[in-house]
Image: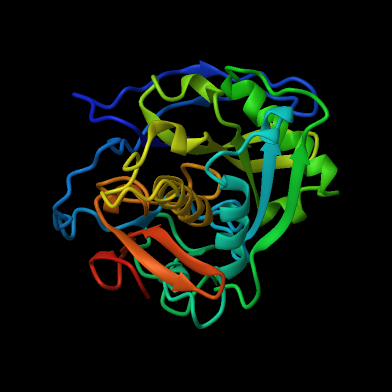
Amino acid sequence: MRLRPLAALAATAVAALSLTLTGQADASQTAAHHGLKPLHAAKQLQPAARSTNTLKLGSSAATGVVSPNPKVYLVFWGSQWSSDPAGVATDMQNMFKGLYGSQDTWGTIMNQYCEGLAKGTSTCGTGGTHINHPTSTPLAGVWFDNSAAAPGSATAAQIGAEAANAAAHFGNTTQTPNLNAQYVVLSATGTHPDGFPSSGFCAWHDKTSSAYGTLAYTNLPYVPDTGAGGCTTFTDGRLLSGIESTETHEYAETVTDFWPSIGWNGGGGEIGDECEQMDSYVTLSTGTFDLQGLWSNSANKCVTHG
């Protein structure tokens, strides 16, 4: 589980959680919180340390390391989504509808990473199975699961179970389609998934075992509830910047460390953890969005385009 933190902490808090999931999610796992990002990040970009941040493969496995052909499923959880004061639902759909093709030079940063090579590899070259930059929108499905209210303070186990519910809803009922699917579970305004915001994170991603195989999913709270400037380095008062920066952080980390933590990690964490103080407005075909910088091994620094 990789956390996008809300506030600077004196030390990384690691919480062992027993996630025995109910419903469709039928196994248990232990999760830890990592990769802290402050709610009000430093306004001056600080160059990331070089070399020590180099990302390396955590496993030689041929699957579950990266998502070679990313597919995103947005899950708007609960009847509380009848209220969306910041316009998150439309914004998240538009952002992912534009994250492909030649206009999206941010997503091409991830093309250098792969799976199927030796543990400890830092340069894929032409080897392995590389991440492919989408040629069409990676947004594969949207579900407003509004038949009942979501828990006001959902546990990590309940969030994982909702990801499994989404897999069933979208018909991804075997492991094969779930080797590229990531389920982004978005909670509505006024809710507190996994203790947000007092638990100190903006979002996190993880994996869970289910009847449909191992699933990659993200816990994405209603970040605008923290106000403008939460979870982004920008101070221009734009309310949606924080959730855009947060979700691109989690999206990229899921793509490059699909079933954490057998994917790409370095001295500073995952691809997004390395670069939490670098945000950039990027204009896509569907609008302009706050995309967080990502670590590039080939450039040996944080970058905002490939």
Residue at 54%, 57% in the rendered image = 66
Task: Give the x, y percent position of residue 15.
Answer: 41, 19
Position of residue 10 in the picture relative to residue 193 (left or right): left
Task: Give the x, y percent position of residue 258.
Answer: 54, 50
Residue at 74%, 55% in the rendered image = 141
Residue at 40%, 51% in the rendered image = 241
Task: Give the x, y percent position of residue 256.
Answer: 48, 56
Position of residue 45 in the picture relative to residue 13 (left or right): left
59 versus 217 height, above or below: below
Q: In the rendered image, is residue 175 in sight? A: yes
Q: In the rendered image, is residue 112 in sight? A: no
106 versus 210 height, above or below: below
- The colour scheme is rainbow
Question: In which quadrant of the rendered view does residue 146 lie?
Answer: top right
60 versus 137 height, above or below: above
Q: Nearer the viewer, residue 300 or 102?
A: 102
Quarter holding the C terminus is bottom left
Question: In which quadrant of the rendered view does residue 123 lie?
Answer: bottom left
